[in-house]
């Protein structure tokens, strides 16, 4: 492990808190040390209060912040003297402890201090760092973990047996640290939990962490347990989308809400899932207690959800009676599924949540394999895992979590999404919490949005094979398909029937009609498996009810598509799938309407550009966003009992009326 400390970078961070920010970010950059909000750092600073009196404050990482991106606002300042007084209490229930931490901050807007605040306070060092280093966890999660740690570090670290984070851990650390720390002590190992380092400067504490973890890595290397053998696995060569979508529907039912189910067929994950001993090594529990809430108790192997749910309920019943307080069972839905064909599957209420679980389990696999190479992975006992999963503080956090967005856990696909109405539809669906796949023949679609819940794919929708590939990638990325917005189409130049060539006619029909038939046919099996039933929105045209001269191919293709929608509504109603059409008109904020074209068309009608844009009954301008917002609403609860509707979005057109 290499130190990332850079003197030039460090010089830009002046003052104790800024130095704390810098080294916290260095720790956060290394995912073998901390993942997604894991780990903790603090610094003790003397500052004047409002009365001008000096007081000692502990700045500790606040809840919800990620070390890699932490700022000053992410640290919670608490009065150090009061924390040290709390540490002397014989007992302090965790909910009451959190209350004491929050009510003794010196900045009301600060985040809730870490549950390890008192532990950081009582360690007699200015800077304290805490990580969940993979190498250290791999060693401690073995039958002889404590002996190995003492062999590696000697007097360099104080060893603390596992106790759940909170006040009891702080009390135990105070007792053992006072007894065992000496002038050689540079850190502390919490068995099955993580490693601490400390120092009088941010650099000293950080580089001690790097050195301590490097010792663990060197030990694993000496035991032939560091470099993992390149995996070999059988890779599936058949479409998986229907099977994955079916599994996602079942997971969503157990969760009680739609879930994103991300799958990854990387050889590493397939090889791990295909191991003959996977049922043993993967089912002992998470690598650290910090991962319990994200990844649940154990991963599910294969696709037998009924068996998994039965095991989960038995696990709950066996330990609930031992809990200090009555517990209400959380949903039994797995967050990690290992499958010989699907590889690694991770579930969450959003693409971000599923991605976090995937990152955690990627590191968990490495930890399990290294511990196995040392003689056998050994997680915490089930009771300890239960205590963390059903911890009062975590249950309180769940109760405080806000109402999810309307389309949380759902997946939408939009065609013709690189610009205009299609791009606006992507934005409207993302804003409602959906994971969205955007398709377009324009390669720019791939980089249209840079976020976990968006996938942009270049796709020629006139190709059946490219449609099938796009749907396969959609399901492998997000687990299924709930909403389909058929927006892609072409509008050729005006041409009267007596001048309309067959080739141009066929091209328009191919894109505007045939491609949409293919999409509907291929998407139907997936829409049938949508947890809240599938929804389709067809972007039609005013030309369906009111065609214009010179637009025979376009008008006929859109009318035929509209008729296809009506037939689909009749056929798919039994599957709970609803399909509706929007008929926009005069949407001018799209690529085909340049300033020059607008000016020319306005002049043709003897209008100004603004008058031309508002040339409708309501004298209002219709934008791509207007169409997109209604398209999204058609997929929502307000239209839950509507299908085969044709809704104009045109400001009122006298010819349609």
Image: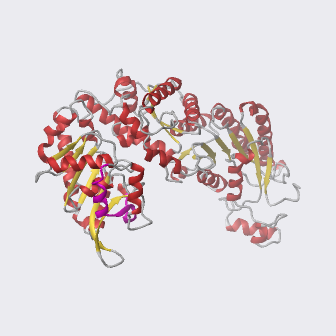
Which of the image's four quarters has the C terminus? bottom right
Residue plotted at (74% across, 54% down): 493
Q: Is residue 248 visible?
A: yes
In the rendered image, the vertical position of residue 246 relative to residue 485, given as above or below: above
Residue plotted at (42% across, 63% down): 110
Residue plotted at (35% across, 55% down): 67
556 or 646, which lies in front? 646
In the rendered image, the vertical position of residue 10 relative to residue 195, given as above or below: below
List x then y, in percent, for residue 314.
47, 26
List x then y, in percent, for residue 262.
49, 38
Whether the magenta-drawn stretch holds residue 213 is answered as no
In the figure, residue 371 lies in which quadrant? top left
Q: Which residue lies most toward the front here? A: 90
List x then y, in percent, for residue 296.
44, 36
| Side of 243 where 219 appears, left or right | left
Whether the magenta-drawn stretch holds residue 83 is answered as yes
In the figure, residue 250 lies in which quadrant? top right
22 or 470, which lies in front? 22
| Side of 390 where 154 appears, left or right | left
Q: Which residue lies most toward the bottom here? A: 52
In the figure, residue 336 lies in which quadrant? top left
221 or 316, which lies in front? 316
74 or 568, which lies in front? 74
List x then y, in percent, for residue 353.
48, 45
Q: Is residue 2 visible?
A: no
Coloring applied to the structure = secondary structure
| Side of 61 where 257 appears, left or right | right
Q: Which residue lies most toward the top here? A: 276
User: Which region is colored magenta?
Assistant: 69-90
> What is the total number of numbered labels drawn onto the structure image?
0
């Amino acid at each position: 492990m290499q130190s990332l400390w850079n003197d030039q970078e460090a010089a830009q961070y002046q003052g104790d808190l800024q130095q704390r920010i810098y080294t916290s970010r260095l720790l956060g950059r290394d995912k073998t040390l901390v993942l997604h909000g894991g780990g903790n750092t603090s610094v003790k600073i003397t500052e004047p209060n409002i009365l001008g009196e000096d007081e000692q404050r502990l700045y500790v990482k606040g809840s919800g912040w990620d070390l890699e991106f932490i700022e000053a606002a992410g640290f919670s300042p608490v009065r150090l003297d009061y924390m040290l007084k709390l540490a002397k209490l014989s007992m302090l229930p965790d909910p009451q402890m959190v209350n004491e931490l929050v009510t003794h901050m010196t900045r009301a807007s600060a985040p809730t201090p870490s549950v390890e605040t008192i532990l950081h306070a009582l360690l007699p060092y200015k800077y304290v760092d805490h990580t969940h280093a993979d190498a250290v966890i791999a060693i401690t999660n073995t039958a002889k973990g404590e002996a190995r740690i003492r062999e590696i570090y000697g007097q360099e670290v104080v060893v603390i047996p596992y106790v759940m984070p909170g006040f009891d851990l702080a009390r135990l650390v105070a007792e053992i640290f006072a007894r065992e720390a000496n002038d050689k002590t540079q850190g502390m190992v919490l068995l099955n939990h993580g490693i601490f380092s400390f120092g009088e400067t941010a650099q000293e504490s950080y580089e001690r962490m790097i050195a301590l973890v490097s010792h663990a890595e060197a030990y694993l290397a000496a035991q032939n347990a560091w470099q993992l053998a390149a995996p070999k696995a059988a890779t599936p060569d058949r479409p998986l989308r229907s099977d994955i979508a079916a599994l996602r529907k079942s997971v969503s039912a157990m969760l009680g809400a739609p879930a994103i189910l991300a799958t990854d067929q990387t050889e590493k994950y397939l090889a791990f899932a295909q191991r003959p001993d996977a049922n043993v090594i993967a089912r002992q529990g998470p690598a650290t207690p910090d991962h319990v809430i994200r990844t649940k108790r154990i991963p599910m192997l294969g696709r037998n959800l009924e068996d998994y749910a039965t095991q989960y309920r038995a696990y709950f019943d066996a330990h609930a009676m031992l809990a200090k307080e009555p517990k209400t069972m959380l949903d039994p839905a797995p967050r990690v599924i290992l499958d010989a064909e699907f590889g690694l599957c991770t579930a969450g209420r959003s693409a971000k949540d599923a991605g976090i679980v995937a990152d955690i389990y990627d590191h968990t696999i490495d930890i399990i394999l290294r511990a196995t190479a040392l003689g056998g992975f050994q997680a915490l006992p089930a009771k300890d895992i239960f205590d963390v999963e059903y911890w009062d503080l975590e249950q309180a956090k769940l109760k405080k979590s806000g109402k999810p967005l309307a389309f949380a856990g759902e997946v939408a696909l939009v065609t013709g999404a690189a610009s205009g109405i299609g791009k606006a539809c992507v934005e409207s669906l993302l804003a409602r919490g959906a994971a969205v796949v955007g398709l377009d023949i324009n390669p720019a679609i791939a980089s249209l949005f840079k976020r976990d819940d968006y996938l942009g794919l270049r796709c020629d929708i006139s190709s059946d094979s490219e449609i099938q590939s796009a749907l396969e990638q959609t399901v492998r990325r997000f687990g299924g398909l709930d909403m389909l917005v058929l927006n892609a189409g072409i509008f050729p130049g005006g041409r009267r029937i007596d001048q309309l060539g067959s080739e141009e006619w066929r091209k328009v029909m191919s894109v505007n009609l045939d491609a949409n038939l293919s999409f509907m046919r291929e998407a139907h099996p997936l829409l049938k498996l949508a947890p809240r039933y599938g929804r389709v929105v067809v972007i039609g045209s005013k030309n369906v009810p009111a065609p214009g001269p010179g637009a025979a191919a376009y008008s006929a293709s859109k009318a035929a598509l509209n008729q296809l929608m009506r037939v689909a509504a009749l056929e798919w109603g039994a599957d709970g799938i609803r399909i509706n059409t929007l008929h926009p008109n005069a949407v001018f904020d799209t690529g085909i309407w340049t300033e020059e074209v607008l000016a020319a068309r306005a002049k043709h009608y003897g209008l100004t550009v603004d008058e031309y844009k508002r040339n409708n009954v309501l004298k209002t301008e219709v934008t791509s966003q207007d169409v997109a917002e209604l398209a999204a609403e058609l997929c929502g609860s307000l239209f839950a009992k509507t299908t085969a509707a044709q809704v104009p979005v045109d400001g009122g057109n006298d010819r349609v009326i």
